[in-house]
Structures are given as structure tokens and as C-alpha cells.
Image (cartoon, rainbow, N blue to C red):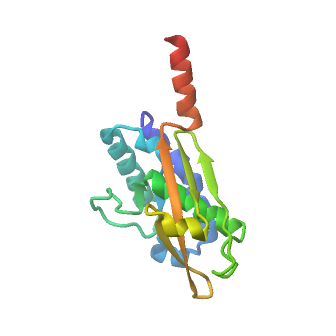
Amino acid sequence: ASNLDGIPAYLAPLLEHARSKIPPSLESETPIFLLATAGMRLLPPEEQAEVLQTTCDFLRFHSHFRIDGPSKAGPCGRSVRIITGEEEGLFGWIAVNYLMDGFSQSDDDRATYGFLDMGGASTQIAFEPSAEEREKAKNLIDVRLRMMGGEEIHHRLFVTTWLGYGTNQARERYVGRLIH
């Protein structure tokens, strides 16, 4: 937030990576998403808005990827936004289970991997409880995914998040208490 002029240098390599994977002829129909996590959630709303606007302007000016128009989600709609801690945990759970083939088993005997992420500013936990525990729980998130073959799979997850309990934030509190 204190270095808005540094955003282009940070984003340029990411855009180049995307361009190396997407043919130029398909760039305008390929959506791009930039989802900010807990570090952005800690900023005051005015600073969040400045970072989102600068990011949105850069992506619009330097790429032809499909970007949402302005909405209450932000200057680039849902294309460039700050996600919730629950979304952060959910996306992490999906990524781990995709990479570990956690979605390849049938619904009857499947076992997915749990996810624990202690980032710089927050910590998330996401897992699919056992069938017995799923029946008792009331606070689970329904997740429906469509596999490459077209079949839909359904999972019910427990996801929780703690803003301010990432490694950097914990260290800041620790040092602050030592000084105090």
C-alpha cells in the first residue's frame, strides 16, 4: 500500500507467465483473476481501494485478458478482489486435493486431504470431516466441483480462519510485547 508505483514491476512477470501459456488469439476471451489474501484484509479500506484500483488499471492497460467491469466487488469486479479467509482456506483445500489426486476416488470410499496454511498475516484450516461427523455438523461449506469428464462431485467442508495469526503478525505481536 505504501508503494503503489511498485505494483507494475510485481505484476509484469505474472502477466508474462500467463501470456506464455495462453495464445494471443485467446487472450481476450480468457478471464484473469488476481485474488488478494490476508495482508490486504489487514489494510484500512482506503489503502485497499488504492491497491485494487492501481492493480486493475495496470491489468487493463497492459493486457487484453478478460476483466470484469466495476461492481461493488471492486474496480475490476470479481477479477481483482480481496478474498475472505474462508475463501482462502477453501481454495487452498481444493489446490492440495487436486495436486494429491484427492478427487479421484468414488464418493463411497473417498478420503480427501486436510489443509493447514499459516501464511504471513493469517492461518486457515480446511478439511472434510468423516461421514459420521458431517451428519452432526451444522457449519459446513457445500462444495460442488465438476471433473474434467463432466461428473459432479460434492464435498462438505469445515473451514476456519484466523486473521492476524500468520507468522509475520505473530512475530510483530511477540516483538511488541518484548519491547513493551
Is 109 drawn above or below residue 40 in the view shown?
Answer: below
Place residue 96 in its image quadrant: bottom right
Does the rendering let one see residue 108? Answer: yes
Q: Nearer the viewer, residue 16 or 144?
A: 144
Looking at this view, name the residue that lies furthest to the left. 72
- Quadrant (top left, top right, bottom left, bottom right) of the N terminus: top left
Looking at this view, name the residue that lies furthest to the top. 180
- Who's the residue at 45% across and 68% down the image? 64
Looking at this view, name the residue that lies furthest to the right. 100
Place residue 123 in its image quadrant: top right
Residue 11 image position (x, y, % from top left): 53, 51
- Who's the residue at 52% across and 37% down the image? 165
Does the rendering let one see residue 7? Answer: no
- Specify whether 59 is left or right of 154: left
Residue 143 image position (x, y, % from top left): 50, 71
Is 127 drawn above or below residue 164 in the view shown?
Answer: below
Is 28 drawn above or below residue 54 in the view shown?
Answer: below
- Specify whether 72 is left or right of 166: left
Is 144 drawn above or below residue 95 in the view shown?
Answer: below
- Who's the residue at 63% across and 80% down the image? 107
Residue 135 image position (x, y, % from top left): 51, 70
Residue 157 image position (x, y, % from top left): 53, 64
- Who's the residue at 47% across and 58% down the image? 87
